[in-house]
Amino acid sequence: MPTMTEIYQKYAYEYDELVSHEDYQRNLNSVLNKLFDFNDKKAIEFGTGTGRLTKIYIETIKESICFDSSAHMLEKSKVNLKDYLHKISFQIVDNEKINTLSLKADLVMEGWSFGHTIIDNKNKLKETAGKLIEDCNKLLNPNGKIIIIETFGTNVDIPNAPHDALKEFYDLLEKEFHFKKEIVRTDYNFENALEAKRIMGFFFGEDMKEKIGKQDSSIIKEFTGIWYK
């Protein structure tokens, strides 16, 4: 099984195959559209990947600037979002370099991206979290909004941060930075259990593959946290 870094650098097709089955009930879509009026607004999105979040809002938004540290992922995103390239720009920027940007937007959003940065910097977690939030704040227009989207567990029965560093990060978001939170189900729906086992196993590893094999289900539970202010 490739490492997470290898997946983001070399396996955009396989990653996109995974996320295309995610949130089949469109719960994330519903919450995001409730939290923010995308119509005629400008957004900055970090951790764009293959455009999984961008697809939710791109029809109604005026402009989106999409960032990711992986050129490989952004190339796939351009293919997935080919009908909207007239209002999207793509840039390669690592989350730790957000402070180098001189932009303003009505919305700054990230999906399943800051969590990786937090885990990579768990020895200076609070400092890293503070810098990420400060850098996002500097990009906001007056009355702008920040939305942070991170995992609360895949193939689990109750929502829980799957890493100690993430739990600390989530606590900081709520207690230190005063974000509000919603937790939604973003379950995967595959054609059959065999497909679920293959696709989920590639991304999440052998333990997940074995667990899904025993479950023999095409629906895989997932919980996602949305922090906003």
Image (tube, rainbow, N blue to C red):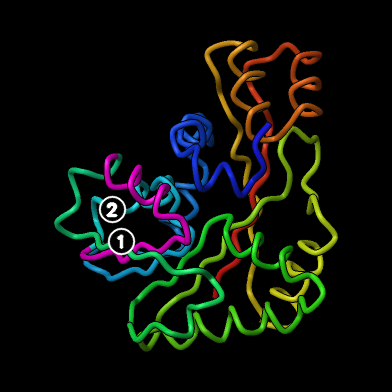
Q: Residue at x 33, y 53 (%)?
A: 57
Query: Where residue 91 sits: x, y (%)?
Result: 34, 65
Q: Is residue 102 above or below residue 89?
A: below
Location of residue 223 (image quadrant):
top right
Query: Where residue 167 sits: x, y (%)?
Result: 80, 62
Amino acid carrying label 2: it is Ile
Q: Is residue 87 above or below residue 191?
A: below
Q: Residue at x 19, y 50 (%)?
A: 84
Q: Nearer the viewer, residue 120 or 128?
A: 120
Q: Is residue 110 above or below residue 131?
A: above
Could you tell me how many numbered marks the image carries?
Answer: 2
Location of residue 161 (image quadrant):
bottom right
Which part of the image, by quadrant, shows the N terminus? top right
What label does residue 71 carry, if any?
none
Q: Which residue is mark 1?
A: 90
Location of residue 86 (image quadrant):
bottom left
Q: Residue at x 70, y 67 (%)?
A: 118
Q: Residues within 10 Å of mark 2 (few under 14, many from 20)?
A: many
Q: Residues within 10 Å of mark 1 (few under 14, many from 20)?
A: some
Q: Is residue 111 left or right of residue 221?
A: left
Amino acid carrying label 1: it is Phe
Q: Nearer the viewer, residue 188 or 50?
A: 50
Q: Nearer the viewer, mark 2 or mark 1?
A: 1
**Which residues are drawn in magenta?**
62-79
Q: Which residue is mark 2?
A: 58
Q: Is residue 225 left or right of residue 33?
A: right
Q: Does 75 appear in magenta?
A: yes
Q: Is residue 24 visible?
A: no
Which part of the image, by quadrant, shows the C terminus? bottom right
